Structure formats: C-alpha cells, structure tokens
Amino acid sequence: MKRSRRTRPGRDGQRGQILVIAVISMIAMIGGISLVLEGGNAYAHQRVVQNGSDSVANAGAMVIAERLGGAIKTDADVKAAAMAMSGSNLLDGFAAYYSDVKGHLLTLAGTLAPNTASAAQVGNVANLVPPGAQGIQVTGTQMFPTTFARVIGMNDFRASADSTAVAGALTGGIFLPVVFPVNIVDCDASGSLGSGETTWDISEPGEPPIGQEYIVPLCKTGAGSFMVLDLDGTPNNCDEEVRNPPKLQFAAFPADVASDNGNNCAKPMADEVNKLAGKIVLIPICDGYCTTTGGSNATYHIIRVAAFYLDYMVAENPGGSGHDPLCQGNGTTLVPIAGNGSSSCLVGWFVRYITSGPVGSGNIEGAGAIGIQLIR
C-alpha cells in the first residue's frame, strides 16, 4: 500500500507573501536609488536657475544704475532688460520687485514694504520706478523633466532661486595710484599745470565705450609735485600698487590722500597699467586744492572718483622736455584735455557705472562711479 505524500499547511501562502515583500522592497529600493540619482540632476538645474536669477537681478540693477547716473529710464526699461536676460538663461519665468540699497522691498511710494504683496513689482501698470529704488529682488523658476524618478511617477520637478542686486555710489574698489585734477586746462611739455575748470563728457557703455576718448596729461602742481598717489604708505612702488592694488575705501568726500614722487614712480608704473588696457580703473579726482606746498610729503584733496575705461598710458621722464606724440592726439577721435600735452598721460574714456565693488547709499554727482553688486 502506497503512502500519500503530505505537505505542510500554508507553505504556498508563505511563498506568496515573501514574493510580495520582495517586490515591494525592490520597488522601494529602485525608488530610493532613482531619487538619489535624480538629486544630482536637480542640483544641476538649481545651479542653472540660480545663475539665471543672478543675471536677471544684475540686468535690472544695471538699468537702475543708468537711471542713477542721469539717464531717463522707466519701469518698462527695467522689465525689458530683466526679460531679455531671463530668456537667454532659459528661465520659465521670474518675479521681480524693487528694493533699496540694502535689499529691503519698496512700495511704489518708496516706503519699506512689509511683504511682496505690497511691494512694487517690476513691470507694474503705473510704469514707475519707486523713489529711492537702488536694486531689484528676483525669484526665477524653471520646470525640468525627470529621468530616473519617472519609475515612481514623478515626471518633472521645479527649481527656483532668489537673488538681489543693488546699484549705488561706489565706496571702494581698485584704484590706480594717480589723480586727475579738475583744473587741467594747460599742461606743457614739462608737465606744468595751468589753471581753470574743465568738464569731461561721460561716455556710454560699450567695448570700447561710445563717446569721446580723452588724453589726460599727468601734470604737476606749481610746487613740482606730479599727480601720483601713495595708496599703501610705501613710497616709489606705484608699479606694485597696480599689480596688487590696496583696498582703498572712501567713507566720505572730500578726503585727503598722500602724494608719491612722480619722477621715480610714473615710468615703472606704465608697464603694469598697460596690462589693464580694455578694463575699467578708478581714478580719484581732486579739486583746486590740488596745488600743494611742496613736491613731496604733500596731500591731494579728493572730491570724487571717476571710472575710466583705459586705453593706454605713456610715462616718459615726467621732468623731461618735449612732447610725447602719443600724448598729443589727432584732434578728432583723440583729444587732449584742453592743453598742449605732456610727456606723460593716461588715455581712455570717462564712464560711470561699468564697474564692481562695494556700494552704498548717497548722492551720485559728476563723475562719481556707480557700482553694481549681488548682495544675496
């Protein structure tokens, strides 16, 4: 007689439960791996959106800088600049609001806004830039498709980033160790300075700037002191000051800055200055008190700072005789500043706002430089 084979009760059910648990565990593992891998993709898109938001904020602040510099600019101009930069950075959209120089949101009336709901938006129906506006706050967004997360039903993610850029009176930055006096009207072959007042036209931004290029002679005062500054307290090292510029700050104007010995300083400085051709440099401007009592241990009375797009520098022996042809100009595109030239000069364009550095509140007058800065 055969014995029948007996099976343990519930064994098939246990196998089925194990299979279900294994499938669920595998799905969870795949989902977890997918999210980890998707994190790298999301981070890359987040950086793209952050860069785009920074660009939009800078573009809006640039228009505000032009407005601070005297150009007629409206809210529509700010919006157009921001929209163009948003499109070039592939943002899906952005929200932008006006701020003061510290990044605080403003209402259309120019008062502090408690929240975005009451803040003046870029692209407002009134086409107004609030009084006191010196920056814009931007939130940019971008939708992007997922790759690995599709296995768990996530087909796209949204990345967003905030940025604020402000424009204001330049309170610090990189300076050349030279000074331009406002009373340059005559600088003869030996560099002697005349008297009077002159006005320098401000050029529009460009590469090179659009406007009058000037030849600015490095003159000397009646006491024989050349317009060369000692920015770091060490005499006769102007070339080093150009290579490694000290962090000069002007908290307020007027300010006094010590002179250096131009006879020993200007010529070795020229090679270093010419390496900066095609860039913006900052030049202190002194008033009628530039005339000093001696050729050394003198100070210059700085009243503002000019942003100067540098073409080239010539620095022959400042005490020598004769004109340097490169300091004479051609009478049309190159014009000496109302003088008969010198053996030393800086050549370039006066600009206002194509520069960077710490910025602050305050009036922007004359050739005072305007800075643009991302603050968050």
Image (cartoon, helix red, strand yellow):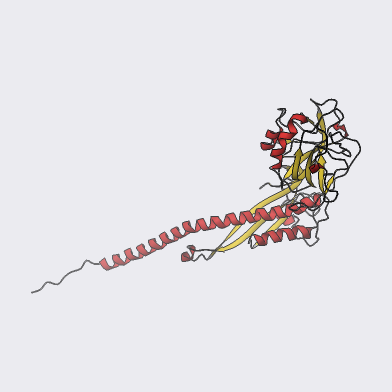
Let me know if residue 81 appears in the view: yes
Q: Position of residue 268 (x, y in %)?
A: 71, 34
Q: Position of residue 144 (x, y in %)?
A: 57, 63
Q: Position of residue 301 (x, y in %)?
A: 83, 32
Residue 189, placed above or below residue 96? above
Q: Farthest residue toward the left?
A: 1
Instruction: Give left or right: position of 23 versus 117.
Output: left
- 37 with respect to 178 (left or right): left
- Foreground residue among 215 and 200: 215
Front residue of this view, candidates 280 and 148 = 280
Which residue is nearer to you in this view: 72 or 135?
72
Res. 50 image quadrant: bottom right
- Considering every residue shown, the one lying at the far bottom of the view is 1
Is 357 or 129 nearer to us in this picture? 357
Q: Is residue 91 left or right of residue 368?
A: left
Q: Can residue 363 be seen at all in this image of the molecule?
A: no
Q: Give the residue at x 71% y 56%.
A: 96
Q: Position of residue 309 (x, y in %)?
A: 75, 46
